[in-house]
Image: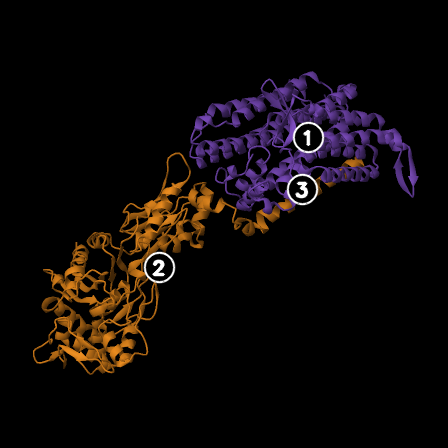
Amino acid sequence: MQHQIKRLSGVFAFALVALMANLLSSQVFQVEELRSRPDNTRLILEEYGRERGAIVVDGKFIAKSVATDGTLIYERRYPFGSTYSNATGYYSIVYGTTAIERIYGSVLSGQDDRLAIDRLQQLLSGTEVRGGVVTLTLDHEMQTAAASALGNRAGAVVAIDVETGEILTLVGAPTFDPNRLVANDTNKVQRYYEKLLQNPNKPLLNRPLVQTLPPGSTFKVVVAAAALESGLFTAASEIPGPAKIQLPLSDKKLGNWQNAACESDNTVTLLKALEVSCNTAFAWLGMELGSDAIQAQAEAFGFNQSFDTPLTAATSVFPTGLDAAQTAMSAIGQFDVRATALQMAMVNAAILNDGKLMQPQLVRDIRTADLQILEKSEPRLIRQAISNSTAAALKEMMRSVVVNGTASSLDLPGIWVGGKTGTAETGTDALPHAWMSAIMEANGRKIAIAVVVENGGGALEVSGNQIAGPIAAKVIAAAIQ
Amino acid sequence: MKNFIVNRARNVELGLIAISFLIAGYAHWLVQIATKQVYEISPIWLVVIGTGALALHLVVRFLAPAADPYLLPMALLLNLLGLVMIHRLDAADLIRSDEPTQVSLEAPNQLTWFFVGIAAVSVGLMIVRDHRLIQRFTFTAMLIGFVLLLLPLVPGLGATINGARLWVRVAGYSFQPAEFAKIALAIFFAAYLARTRLSIQSIKTRFFGIGIPRVQDLGPIVIAWLVSILVLVSQRDLGTSLLFFGLFVGLLYVATGQRTWLAIGAIMFSAGALIAYSLFSHVRLRATVWLDPFSYANAEGYQLLQALYGFASGGILGQGWGEGFTWLVPYANSDFILAAFGEELGYAGMAGLVLIYAILVQRGLRIAMSARDDFGSLLSIGLSLVLALQLFVVFGGVTRLIPLTGLTAPFLAAGGSSLISNWIMIGLLIRISHTTNLLNRPAGEV
């Protein structure tokens, strides 16, 4: 029987090898295939069972995971409610993820390759796998001030640190409370989401980054920049500024918001034209410079291209192939010119930063769960949008708009602030959009701001100053605290 | 007394028991961390389990001092790892339940069965001082075996659980008689073949050069085949059927050395399985789900797919004790406990488990090789064969190598009948190895 027993043990060995060889397929070779099957719920559960990393602003958690009572499943919390919703987005078991929660999903969930060493340490020490931390560039005081100043009016506020391109404020309204999209009660979440979808003001839209609107008179600084860059004009150049001008090849006339000439003798300096937001002067200037020159200048500031902050911003548009009348309208930020709040903030930022346009950035660094920095964002120059001297001249002109012109709401005691108002016709019966551009230099900070309140103003240019201006002023006040 | 203390084999056994205890204790500690101590076990229980294991060791030291030192620690390690996993799944149920008081916990039951199992081994070693005595009960064993096997078919007594009629319910307790029938039948087959093997072996007709067994020798195999087919059809369980038929054919081959038996057995079993496939829809369904579980993802294929997803999540190194979603697999603590191990310990852990089983089977075969008597040798092979077949059928089932069956992983899976009967099998091997080693000891040694 010895012989048969040896045979039998050979059969046993073969059977065990067959078992282990067969197991290789599901544990090694077909892992991806099995894990990606739609009926495999483990991936979702894994995500929800792990402590997702926090999103941090100024040392405060603006998104964090907390273990809920009695279960292993973590719930996402956003301690500041809707204040940071445009940056964080949401992390919903029903609707997936958006914004930073989506783009930095692999870091926050701990699956990113950059966290491989951290994961290994957690594995060896037997502790739970925890996700990485994402720090944003936002300024808590400014963000909070902007959100409360804008309130529930449809609009957006963006502020940028001009030297680094760091986005300090990213506010849109109306928006949503991400806490109500991540709750475990699926029915409640669905009801809330349906309500958001039905709201005509589109609370789910990331307004500061993707809502493009006619910039109105705030676009005049771009035309002024083109004029100064051409070498043909200075702030003191005299240009026509009548009450109305005839648009070429058109039966239409373009008038000033004041319904009067910008200066009694029908000519006006470029400085004065910006101070009082003289439409006829800029329409003339636009036609004099030509649409190509304005387009080139607009594109130098970032128009006609999109940016990843890393949240992707919509492309702001300066149209091509314009005739003279369209050029005149475009020069005052109407016709088909469209800009996001981010784009207008970038124009202002380049002016304040000696003409250097910096890449707008929303993420400062990513860290391990133990807050060791893994990767840090570095300031990145996109291009020199305007020369040093043009930038210096425009700065003074924008300062003059605050001191002597339409942006009086930004005249704050003891702070150097420049600005430019805008009231953009919507082309419909709806009220125009109220804009305010602002640049400030104080306490060692150089900040550019753009505020827009959609359909917020009356027909007059003063609406930018009266409606958008105070919001910008509050953000500035928060910046110097 | 000197032999009681200075006994190399027993000291090896004690050392391995300690190591088994440390491994399982470490696993338990990891589970406690992972499940955040929602369901803590008093350290007293660790002492109680340790005392139980030590007591069994002392019983062996007294009653079977020359026994193989690896059997007890390996079975103990599997049993303890199974307990940790069952406890871990209890914790998962508690965590997810809205009414924790309503959750039925399996670990305390399993712990009870563990003590019953080692008590059965102790009592058995006390009563059976020499395995050769068992040979007297050849036909008693046969009778007990067949009765136990067919008991679930008795109306009013048998119970169908999860589609298989493998259970008997008496006075509120249910048990699987087939788990004990396998021991009785292993004893019967071994004893019967030890007696008749030479006559079966010597007389054979040759037909085109192939040895053909005599018709009267075919009798027992035909009976065994009929019983296994009956089990397959009536109890709806391929695993149990395969276990008995495989046990008989395997022993027949070892006893006679005629490979023809293997071929005849394979053909008969395949024919039976094919007939069952064509006649019975539940057998067909099992096979269909096995071939394409993905088409039945939310129905009959759900359990198998959840197991495969668990294996995939486990990968090579596993999710770690308590870190997987093992509770997604229905019956994760019994039929599918291997899937739970695969998910949390990975391919590496599965290889480890297979290795422990391989050691047990290999020790059984080693005892068979050195046994002085045919009965002892054949019984050792039979018990090893039962262990190996169970592992192969359940392992192959949950990994989709073969269709699913109702067998469970020996020592690991929750279930009293299976655990107790497997411990009794270890007890028998301990007894045979002790007798054998005593007989094989060089003269003059005490």
Neighbours of disc 2 within 10 Å: few (<14), some (14-19), many (20+): many
Residue B380 lies in what quarter of the image?
A: top right
Seen at 39% across and 52% down, the residue is: A97
Q: Which amino acid does label 2 sit on?
A: Leu
Q: Residue A107, which numbered label? A: none
Q: Are marks 1 and 2 on the same chain?
A: no
**Residue A433 position (above or below residue B206):** below
Left or right: A65, with B52 as reference point: left
**Residue B376 position (above or below residue A237):** above
Left or right: A203, with A271 as reference point: right
Q: Position of residue A172 (x, y in %)?
A: 27, 56
Seen at 68% across and 28% down, the residue is: B68
Q: What residue type is labelled 3?
A: Ala
Q: Which residue is tagged 2?
A: A311
Q: Where is residue B386 in the image (x, y as percent from the top left)?
A: 70, 32
Query: Which one of the lettered chains is coloured purple?
Result: B
Neighbours of disc 3 within 10 Å: few (<14), some (14-19), many (20+): some
Q: Are marks 1 and 3 on the same chain?
A: yes
Given this view, does label 1 or label 2 mark the residue nearer the observer? Answer: 1
Q: Mark 3 lies on which chain?
A: B
Label 2 sits on a secondary structure element that is loop
**Observer-nearest residue: B254 or B103?**
B103
**Observer-nearest residue: A442 or A174?**
A174
